[in-house]
Amino acid sequence: MTIKSRVSIGGHRATDVSEAVKRKYQASSSLKKGSALDKLFSYVFHLILLACYFVYTIVRLVQYTNNKLRVRFLNLAYNPSKAPQLIREDVSKLGKIPKRLSVILTLKSEEEEGGGFYGLLNDAAEATTWTVAAGIPVLSIYEYDGVLKNSLEDLRISIFKKLSDYFGSSAVPTFSIRVPRTNKTYYGVNSDEDLEYKSGEIDIQLTLLSYDDGKPTIVELTKTMAELANKKEISPKDISIKLIDSELVQLIGYEPDLIVLFTPTLDLQGYPPWHIRLSEFYWEPDNEDVTYAIFLRALQKYSTCKINVGK
Amino acid sequence: MTESWLSTFPGYLATLEAVKRLFANIIQTGPVPQHIGFVMDGNRRFAKRENIELKEGHNAGFESMAKILEICYECGVKSATVFAFSIENFKRNKMEVMWLMELAKARFTQIVQNGELCEKYGIQIRIIGDKSMLPKDVLEVLNEAERITKENTRAILNVAFPYTSRYEMTNALKNIVSENVDTLDLEAITEKYVEEHLYTGDQPPLDLLIRTSGVGRLSDFMLWQVSKKGEVEMELSEKLWPDLTPWDICWILIKYSFKRSYHNNTVSSLKKVD
């Protein structure tokens, strides 16, 4: 028998069975409305599910306590105490460090400790400082709503303050902040006009990302391309991965090597999807705080992982 | 392995079947993920550990996939997407690529002939990705599998072969741009519109992503679908793919069910804001 004829037999059977399945399905759905016995069954089933939830809750409680304790222990064990030398020492032990780092921060409620707008500013400033001390030249900070982008002056001041806290006011590292899509870059706390500052080597290049830099930007790009195609300036055939990549790199930036999520679960929150192709994710379950210990653990984990495209 | 001696008991399969159905009945009284993505990582490491040939490792991976999909569909999952082969995988050594192609061909031939999975659950198979990269004979078998299961409506199995998410997004944008060559309608182009042009656009949105062997990356799989605020659960297992058992999946489904029943008040309120 050839494959094809066998195949068609299989096909026949498939439809027969799917018919049977359909009938069974319809039967069961009509039963749902029906007899009291079935209602009872579905109650019993749901009760078992609730029992499963109960078991899960207990497991989860143990996990939660465990995680919280571990994070607390880590925070005690790794405390940078505002000394960049300590950070450098920690990082120098690592085999490799990322060239481009990204962190995901969240705006927490005012009531929480370290929450609210000023908490977020502080988190961003600290993450920037640790990155400089670790010797990583590029950092992007993702915050869903773009709160940081809208309060640039506050952010510049708090980064400057934090850097001088760590490095001393005589040797504050230089930094630039880029806001994608506006194509604007800001230098230092107020060195936008300072040519010497701008032309010198910038210690840390910061990019501020928000939801709008992800899917909405891809949508904008599509619109632009559609317009061009409509004017016959490009053909749909010209659209390739390479083209889109180069456009998005120009608009948003390069893909980070490592993304540290300071969130209790692995939730990418609409992070630019084009830019997470091979990025390594790190998060500490049940942790919400932005602490140096988590930052360092992420770098440690990254140093051990092997990325091989396709292999 | 406990399974091997257990399976010698009479009525083992029937019991297993019954247990599966019972579990499905139970889990269906709560929220069930409508679309699950699988990154099946660890076949090669499994082969190395077990001291078996690479080929056998991939085979074990397939067996594991069939078992896991069966339980998922039984539980009412509407759509599953499996990352079978990445476009980047063509960079692997020629022998392995050839084996993988042969494996795919053999397995799909088997599926279209016996149709175990597809018959029982009425599953429609779709091949997603850059099919033009496949050898001709493999492509024929895959097309045949798609054609034969076309009428099935109960659930969908997307086989990403060979696939990358960037290719998928590029393809979606290309299609949208082509639509606009003659008549321009910029208003219509929205996030939702792009999502609808992805391969999985007509299916329920991704609820759960499972990746094995402790890797914390997406490796170019369903990037657009995953990056959403509070809508996708990601399950990164330390186990190698062939080691993942239906029990693990049951536990993951319970976990999902629990999270969606108790944490999701926040998510639904977020959705309303959007």
Image (cartoon, grey):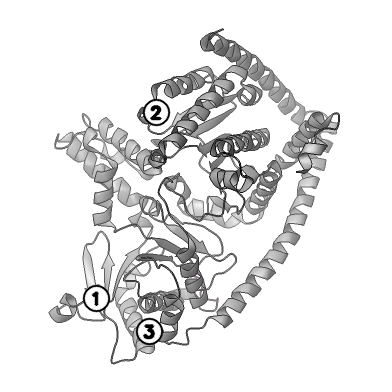
Q: Amino acid at mark 3?
A: Lys
The numbered dot on residue B134 is: 2
Residue, disc 3: A162
In this view, the residue in front, A171 or B27, is A171
The amino acid on which the numbered mark 2 sits, given as a three-letter code, is Leu
Q: Residue at x 41, y 64 (%)?
A: A143
Upstream in sequence: badge 1 or badge 3: 3
Chain of the residue displaying label 1:
A
The 10 Å Cα crowd at callout 1, few under 14, some 14 to 19, many 20 or more, is some
Magenta span: chief secondary structure: loop
Image: magenta residue range? A108-112
Q: Quadrant of residue B174?
A: top left
Q: In this rendering, do the residues under marks 1 and 2 share a single chain?
A: no
Q: Chain of mark 3?
A: A
Label 1: state its secondary structure: loop
Percent position (x, y) of residue B16? 78, 34
Labels 2 and 3 share a subunit: no
What residue is pinned by disc 1?
A202
Q: Residues within 10 Å of mark 3 (few under 14, many from 20)?
A: many
